[in-house]
Amino acid sequence: MNELMRIVDIDEEYVYLQALEASNCSSCAIKGSCNLTGDPNRKIKAINSNKLDLNRNEFVYIKKIDSLESKVAFIMYGIPLLTMVIITVLLFSFGLNEIISFILGLTGMLISYYFIHLYDKKVAKTKYVPEIIEKVGIYKTFQI
């Protein structure tokens, strides 16, 4: 999915962008919870891999990974929940007490959150950063 954004800051490694309300935001089911639009102080990091000559207050198109929200939601909520349920059910089926099985299931869930945190720190911070694909010459119809 491509989105139009305005450049608010540039450093050596990233270009920081301000999201503009996309045309398909009004029909999106999670438009109130994505936090991409509406806040003028929110900056989104993007990579200028095409080495385009960019300046502040210019408009660019970025390429976002399709269904990224679903993947992130599953990683953040689905994996820990499945871990807790599987550990609790297995331990209870092996004859452990319900409370001990539940506590060990919660402990397994906390451990899975720790591994997700490590994954997020090392892999996801660079793998899921949007990429600038095109610079827009003049975008006169938009007002900030």
Image (tube, rainbow, N blue to C red):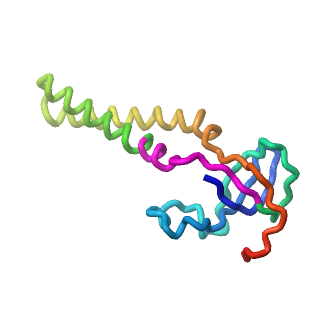
Give the residue drawn at x 75%, y 76%. Answer: 141
Residue 63 magenta-drawn? yes
Q: Would you say 40 lies left or right of 28 here? A: right
Which stretch appears magenta? Answer: 60-74
- Residue 123 % position (x, y): 59, 34
**Residue 32 placed where, x, y %?**
48, 67
Does the magenta segment cover residue 34?
no
Pick the front one: 7 or 23: 23
Please, is residue 103 above or below residue 4 in the view? above
Is residue 99 toward the left or the right of residue 62 in the image?
left
Residue at 78% x, 58% y is: 9
Q: Residue furthest top?
A: 94
Residue 17 lies, in percent from the top left, at 71, 58
Pick out the residue farthest to the right: 53
Picture layout, residue 80 above or below residue 11: above
> Split into 4 quadrants, where in the image is the C terminus?
bottom right
Q: Position of residue 61 (x, y in %)?
A: 72, 56
89 on left or right of 54 = left
Which residue is located at x 73 percent, y 74 percent? 142
Q: Nearer the viewer, residue 45 or 41?
A: 45
- Residue lying at 60% horizontally and 33% vertically, measured from the top left: 122
Residue 82 sits in quarter: top left
Please state which of residues 115 and 26 is positioned toward the viewer in this rendering.
Answer: 26
- Image position of 70 (left or right of 19): left
